[in-house]
Image: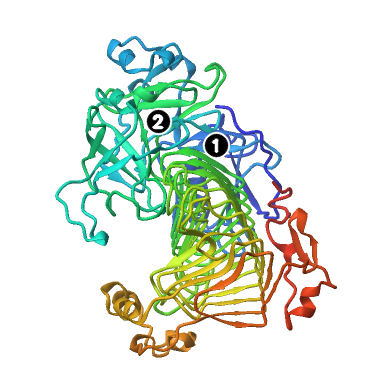
Amino acid sequence: MSVACVLVMASVLTSAASLHVAPDGDDAHPGSADAPFASLERARDAVRALKERAEWPPGGVTVWIHEGVYPRSSSFGLVDADSGTEEAPVVYRAATGEMAALVVGGVEIPASAFEAVTDAAAIDRIDAAARAHVVFAGLDALGVRECGAFPDAFREPPALPELFYNNTRMTLARWPNGDWAEVKRIVESGPAPWRRHASDQPGTIEYDGDRPARWLRAPAVWLHGYWCFDWCAETIRIKAIDPDARHISFVQAHCYGLGSGNPGPRRFYATNLLEELDQPGEYYLDSKSSRLYFWPPGPLDDATIVLSTLADPVITVNDACFVTLQGLTVAACAGNGIEIHAGRACQIAACHVFNTGHNGIVVDGGRDHTVVACDIHDTGTAGLRLSGGDRKTLTPSGHQALNNHLFRVSRRQRTHANHVHLAGVGIRLAHNLIHHAPHQAIGLAGNDHVIEFNEIHHTGMETDDCGACYMGRNPSERGSVLRYNFWHHIGSTRAHGSCAVYFDDGAGGQTVFGNVFHRAAGGHFGAVFSHGGHDNTVNNNVFVECKLALGHAPWNDQRWRDYLDADLWQNNLLKEVDITKPPYTDRYSGLEGFMEFDGQPRHNHAARNVVVDCDAFVRGNWTLTDNWITDDAPGFVDAAAMNFQLREDAPAFKRVPGFEPIPFDKIGLYTDDLRPTLP
């Protein structure tokens, strides 16, 4: 397999002892630079042996992983026995000055494995114009015994194999190509309690045209669609197609029922159909016959073709302390790329994680873990998930995500698979570049997080009723600060609403300070939008060319009481944590009397904001202090080049008493030893 031509950068980390691994090594070797090991496990065992013999070097150990490909059929695991110490860490890192050390969770398919399709039944199912181009490979001969199948319905995709050609994800054969079909009419929505509609039928739609008649001989057909709301995509198997009536019925009901919960047409596409393998770069997996059908986008000879097969994480670090993974490339897996669970002070540094079936990197529990200077992209679900700390005691995790580049996530799960998910207490997300995804960029849950100096753009590009940063449904989650971020070009053209920062369903007690919002609101939402919540503070920000700067959809007294009495909030506010007692009453003044609501005013607060060329400033319940709404130039360095730094002599400082300079030039990625150049 070829490797990406990426030189691994130098590091400030040094260790007193070194071991070496190379694809052409031998596990019988001593692991020296001249005689390296062949496997990561052999190097790991050699590190353990040093500890067992009490020969631990005072500067720790570095395992140098030399350029080449390291295929994985199981996870490479590190545990407590593989820990280092603060003064003597264990470092697994790509060799300096070499091309990528590529750890792959898949099987390479040689060009010789592909054959012309001769089976008459298969040929008959393939579009006539595609038959001369489609080839197939038998997976059994490649050692792939099971390629799995879709369940009847799913939002999070199963960890099934995917095909990659020269490091590019291929498309599971679909119709329409690269676009959406629209539902002509809802014949039966299926059960939809939110509409007060009961039904014993899963649901039926009417479609336009005759294309689905081609699928009648397919063993199974799944449709992926936005069936009700444009923030909830789901894939559902078809039960029957009636080509005369142009009806499709499903085997399982959509969770919200079929039919528009948001304005706009309901959209769908069919997936994994041999009948729709009709353009270069598409493939079809036949789980019953264990065959892969493929229309290559280029020559097979000299191409690198990989089928991702590893459903477990490629690399796991469990209960370990002071372990660093640096400069590694992890790709082409069916599950997650790298996971850290529990432990303390581990670091994932300057790694390149892409083409995963699920998440790129997951940090779950433990304390003081760091993900820094990584490039994470083209993930099947989320890019980076961080959780930790104790919400009952409000003990922070100390986790950090710094200087990472995250883009093109959510390739298989179109909604609620964000670039970054934060949960727990006390996580810092800083100096990251986050862009391009169909839904939300940052999913925020928990308490006392700091989100600062990030650039976020072109998110929510396919969805509606969403925010680049979203949190909601749990008012005990408070105390997070969003400061000095640049949010721009947020949302799609769909009509209901999109925003940069979305405090949904009662979320309150957050601070938005010193941000710049440019073209970051659409539909009926503001760039910062609150649905039902209160006590959010929006101060010292700049809003530029936003349809609406601040939005709020207040809840009336009855709705607020209903939420307080509902099982969800009773559990969130009094059982998972107890907001009526310390440490919550000590930490958050806004919680005083929260559960004894008696109709008091519920406002959000905005002060000292600069609002430039926006269609409107505010809607809803806000207390407003010293905000400046203007169509005049407020003193930007170069607005045409999107440099919204305010000059020292900017009129904004005179017009807004107490307005503090925003360090716009410090926002985004920075260069250092781990990231010597910027993308």
The reply to whether residue 139 is in sight is: no
CA neighbours of label 1 inside 10 A, class few (<14), some (14 to 19), many (20+): many
Question: In this rendering, is residue 51 above or below 101?
Answer: below
Q: Nearer the viewer, residue 321 or 383?
A: 383
Q: Name the residue under label 2.
A: 174
Question: In this rendering, is residue 533 above or below 420?
Answer: below
In this rendering, would 375 be left or right of 529? right
**Disc 2 marks which amino acid?**
Arg
CA neighbours of label 2 inside 10 A, class few (<14), some (14 to 19), many (20+): many
Q: Which residue is drawn at 33% across and 77% down?
A: 559
Q: Is mark 1 on a helix, strand or loop?
A: loop
**Exactly how many numbered labels are in the figure?**
2
**Disc 1 marks which amino acid?**
Phe
Q: Mark 1 points at which residue?
A: 37
In this rendering, would 401 be left or right of 271? right
Quadrant where the image shows the N terminus: top right
Q: Distance between the residues labelled 1 and 2?
A: 44 Å
Q: Position of residue 259 (x, y in %)?
A: 31, 50
In this rendering, would 19 be left or right of 463? right
Residue 197's disc is none
View extreme (right): residue: 649
Q: Residue 117, located in which quarter of the rendered image?
A: top left
